[in-house]
Image (spheres, grey):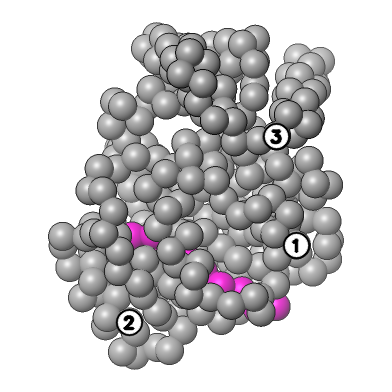
Amino acid sequence: MDYYVIIPAHNEAEYLTTTLDSLANQSLRPKKVVVVNDNSEDTTGEIIASYIAKDDIFHTRPISSSAEHMPGSKVIQAFNCGLELVDDTYDFIVKLDADVILPLNYFEQIAKTFKINPKTGIAGGFIYEQNQHWEWQLNHPMNKQHVRGAFKAYSKSCFKAIGGLKSAMGWDTVDELLAQYHGFNIHTDDALKVKHLRPTGTAYNKKARGLQGQAMFAMRYGFWICLIASIKMTLKQKNWTAFTDNMKGFFEAKKNKVPFLVSQNEGVFIRKLRWTNMRRKIST
């Protein structure tokens, strides 16, 4: 199967070499890798150029967006710029972070998943990060059916059906909700262990953390689902400010009439799906 990989990169010189090596050495190599150099001030550009010089799968597109790291809008805007450099002749497309190490059979297995089950819309492995003892340990959300935004692979039919990726906080949740709305399945493979070199969330600023509630509003969760999700997040993080930031963001978004990311019918489906999943977890 043919696939493209798009990597948004902003000041990734510390990790990028390892990521590109793991792509170049895949047992099933990508048709094209586009590294979007987003306003980097370090040697990211030089690293990309060195890989382009020695391997024709690598390509780049320099862009100049804001230097401020905001989850969602910045990274997906960069992804969409990279998307303009690929054509329509692919079986699946990948949004990849610039700070991961992939198993060498990673995309061979992902391709098998899409080929065996055409209803799989989004696929990925599990994320591992180093603890204080330099040991690699699982750092995946409680929802094991969620594919982390650091390495999301989309079948062509799914990617087209959901209209690509939303340039907003919550993009890597709304994509899976819309995939299910359109009848696709989410597949996670716990045998595919991806090493994440930068701990999750270290680059997010306080303003970004406050956008969680806004994202929940934009996905049409409604008050009660947002409330329950905020409580769960607070308990998981053991941080009361997560609750207050989320709820404040939700009500501010409602007051300011922030545009929804999904249609009214999609919102009905999303709320029903969320309630069904919550009831299932309570009963097990």
Q: 199 or 12, which is in the foreground?
A: 12
User: Mark 1 against mark 2, which lies toward the viewer?
Assistant: 1
Q: What residue is shown at x 25% (from left), y 43% (from top)?
A: 68
Q: Residue 114, percent across and down? A: 75, 64
Tell me the magenta residue range. 1-9
Q: Earlier in the sequence, mark 2 or mark 3?
A: 2
Secondary structure of the magenta portion, mostly? strand
Give coordinates of residue 2: x percent, y percent.
65, 78
User: Looking at numbered disc 3 in the image, what kind of residue is underneath it?
Assistant: Ser
Q: Is residue 48 above or below residue 189?
A: below
Q: Judge from the rendering whether residue 15 lies leftward or rightward of residue 153; answer left or right.
A: left
* Quadrant of image for the C terminus: top right
- What whole-number distance in Å separates the C-alpha atoms at marks 1 and 2? 31 Å
Measuring from the top left, give residue 87's x and y in whole percent. 59, 77
Question: Any mark on residue 263, and which?
Answer: 3
Identify the image quadrant of residue 259: top right
Q: Mark 1 highlights which residue?
A: 157
Circle 3 sits in a helix, a strand or a loop, which is it? loop
Mark 2: few/some/many CA within 10 Å (<14, 14-19, 20+): some
Residue 201 in which image quadrant: top left
Asked whether the viewer can see residue 15, the reply is: no
* Residue at mark 2: 51
Q: For numbered disc 1, what is the local secondary structure?
A: helix
Q: Residue at x 83, y 56 (%)?
A: 119
Q: Amino acid at mark 1?
A: Ser
Which badge, 1 or 3, is on the more N-terminal residue?
1
Label of residue 98 in the image: none
